[in-house]
Every structure is written in structure tokens, then in C-alpha cells.
Image (tube, grey):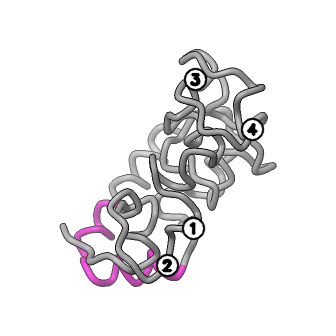
Amino acid sequence: MLEERVQSTAFKMLIKTAGLIAVCFLLVHGCYDVACPSDWRGDTICDLACMTLDCGLDSTTEQMNSSDCLATCTAAGCTAALLGNSVCDLACNLQTCGWDAGDCGVCAQGCLASMLGNGVCDTPCNTESCEWDKGKCVFTK
């Protein structure tokens, strides 16, 4: 399993070096298999690349309560009652908690769903996991 992940990571880095090709690939796929292969979700290993709403919060059920990262999230001080309660709770505002299961952001801290693809390059959304604000931001290496 570890060897497969190392190979996948090496492949991901190879794709990143392709520049524009990588941007096109990212814009086509919400949860792209290069960064978060489908067999990583629900495999009991917390994969930060899969901790976005598009990738189902590293879960096969797309629920934080079955996420591979739930133990890491709760060990940091977040409780199940705080996750996804429509309030951005500081204790849960971590990548391992899916940015409070989306309450604090959908793909990066501070990047709210309403900011994605709204025609403006929003700084909190200008990350690989947010697909460079769904293509509104310039991709830079």
C-alpha cells in the first residue's frame, strides 16, 4: 500500500511539472484521481489530499463521521457534535476535520462554497485542493 502511494505521489508530481496540462486536468475533475485515488477513500488511512467535500472527506459515504481522518480530527479537540453544525468551530477548523466538515471552508481554510467559481480569484481558494478557485486564479509553479 505504501509503495502504491509513493508511486502515485511521484506520478502526481510528474503531472504538476506539466504546467498547463495539470491545470486542464484539475479543471475537468472535482476530486481528481491523481491526488486522491478512489481506493484511498475509506481505506482507514487519513489522506489529507482526500479531505475535501469533492473527495467525500476521505470517506466512501461522504460523511465526516465515517472519514478515515475522524480519529485524527477528534484527537485534536474537535467533537462529533461540532462537526458540520453550520457554525465554523475553531476546534474543528483543521484540514483533518474537513474544515469543520465544510462549515469553515470546502477545500481550504476560509474558502467557502459561495467563493468558488464566482468569477473572482479569491485568495483562500487559490490552492491546488480548490482547483485554483475553480480556474479563476492563475496557476503558478
Q: CA distance from mark 1 to mark 4?
A: 18 Å
Mark seen at residue 72: 3
Residue beneath disc 2: 118
Distance from disc 2 to disc 4, alpha carbons, whole Å, reads 25 Å
Q: Quadrant of residue 131?
A: bottom left
- Is there a contact, CB below 8 Å, between mark 1 and mark 2? yes
Question: Which of the image's four quarters has the C terminus?
Answer: bottom left
| Amino acid type, mark 4 | Asn
Name the N-terminal-most of marks 3 and 1.
3
| SS at mark 1 in the image | helix
Disc 2 residue type (three-letter) = Asn
Residue depicted at x 49% and y 78%: 118
Q: Secondary structure at mark 4?
A: loop
Q: Earlier in the sequence, mark 1 or mark 4?
A: 4
Under mark 3, the amino acid is Thr
Give the CA separation, mark 3 to mark 1. Answer: 28 Å
Furthest residue to the left? 141
At x 32%, y 61%, the residue is 123
**Pick the front one: 10 or 129:** 129
Q: Note whether 101 is above or below 126 in the view shown.
A: above
Return the x and y of residue 114 as percentages of the image width and height. 57, 67
Position of residue 90 relative to residue 136, above or below, is: above
Majority SS type along the magenta span? helix
Dot 2 crowding, Cα within 10 Å, few <14, some 14–19, many 20+ = few
Residue type of the residue flagged with mark 1: Ser
Task: Give the class, few, some or many, for how many residues have Cα within 10 Å of label 1's Cα (few <14, many ≥20).
Answer: few
Q: CA distance from mark 4 to mark 3?
A: 19 Å
Q: Which residue range is magenta in the image?
A: 11-28
* Figure quadrant of the N terminus: top right
